[in-house]
Image (cartoon, helix red, strand yellow):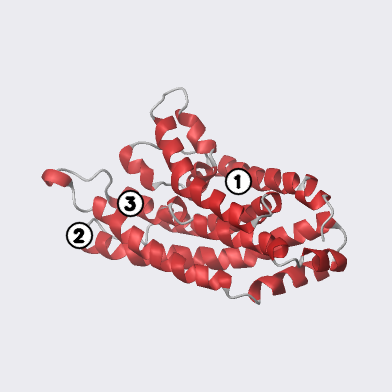
Amino acid sequence: MRAALVAEYRKLVSTRLWWLLLIVMVAYLVFVAAVVSTTFVFAPDGGRPPLEGVAAARATYSIVNGVGYVFPLVIGSLAMTTEFRHKTITQSLLVEPDRTRFLVAKLISVVPIGLVAGVVGVAATVLGGAPLLQIKGDGAMLGDGEVLLGLFFGVIVVALWAVIGVALGSVLSNQVAAIVVILAFTQFVEPIARVVLAQVDALAGASSYLPGGAADSLIGASFLSGSGTVDLLPRWAAALVLLGYAAAFAVAGRLTTLRRDVG
């Protein structure tokens, strides 16, 4: 297993695509965090903003997941789908013929990259959102314990998304298809589904079990909370839900894509 882990990790760090994605991620999160923070410091018609103080800071910083989780998902999926696109899967399986061990090595090897992406993403979110909260709002709240805890779990969430991306890539081995599905789900399907479900009392709780909803719960805040369209799970339950998605995709990939002959 150690040899497989080292081999998979070297594949990741030897490519430039993942850090190019990090650069785009930083620019995107800085911009979105700055925009979101304006909604908490400039109230329309002189009224009160939807969230203030610690709540506003936590909601602003939570966008590292709310809009940023597409990036670690893509990074993780590329770690797997690139093998099929460039036909290196055959050589990889010759080095590690045990396909279960190969998949587990893929899942674990992306964790360090995911943690780096998490630190970078959280820092970008704070960089974009904190100045306006500090200057025009009630403060950036970076000394508050709950805010710091949310930032910590933001890093963990991004790493988990990278793992889920690898698992998803094992199911959707076509790189273009995987990226299209990730973009469609993260930018349109889930955000709309969470808002719609929240409007139906009987289904409101279900939105927390969607991947992004569970990740918001692990962070402990959501930028959707300003509109009242969010219902969070306990952190332990949220962690189990996210790990469940990773396990489900990984098992599906092992029983389908990685069960077939490759060449």
Count neighbours of disc 2 (C-alpha within 10 A) and say few if under 14, some if 14 to 19, many if 20 or more: some
Count neighbours of disc 3 (C-alpha within 10 A) and say few if under 14, some if 14 to 19, many if 20 or more: some
Give the CA distance from mark 3 to mark 2: 14 Å
Decide if residue 5 is on the left or right side of residue 57: right
Q: Which residue matches tag 1?
A: 242
**Image quarter of residue 127:** bottom left
Give the CA distance from mark 3 to mark 1: 26 Å
Residue type, label 3: Val
Q: Position of residue 84 (x, y in %)?
A: 72, 61
**Image quarter of residue 263:** bottom right
Q: Nearer the viewer, residue 231 or 246?
A: 246
Q: Which residue matches tag 2?
A: 136
Q: Position of residue 256 (x, y in %)?
A: 77, 46
178, above or below 190, in the image: below
Q: Position of residue 182 (x, y in %)?
A: 54, 51
Please give the label number shown on residue 54: 3
Q: Nearer the viewer, residue 30 or 237?
A: 30
* Dot 2 and dot 1 residues touching (CB under 8 Å): no
Residue at left offset 73%, top offset 48%? 253
Label 1's element?
helix
Q: Position of residue 241 (x, y in %)?
A: 60, 41
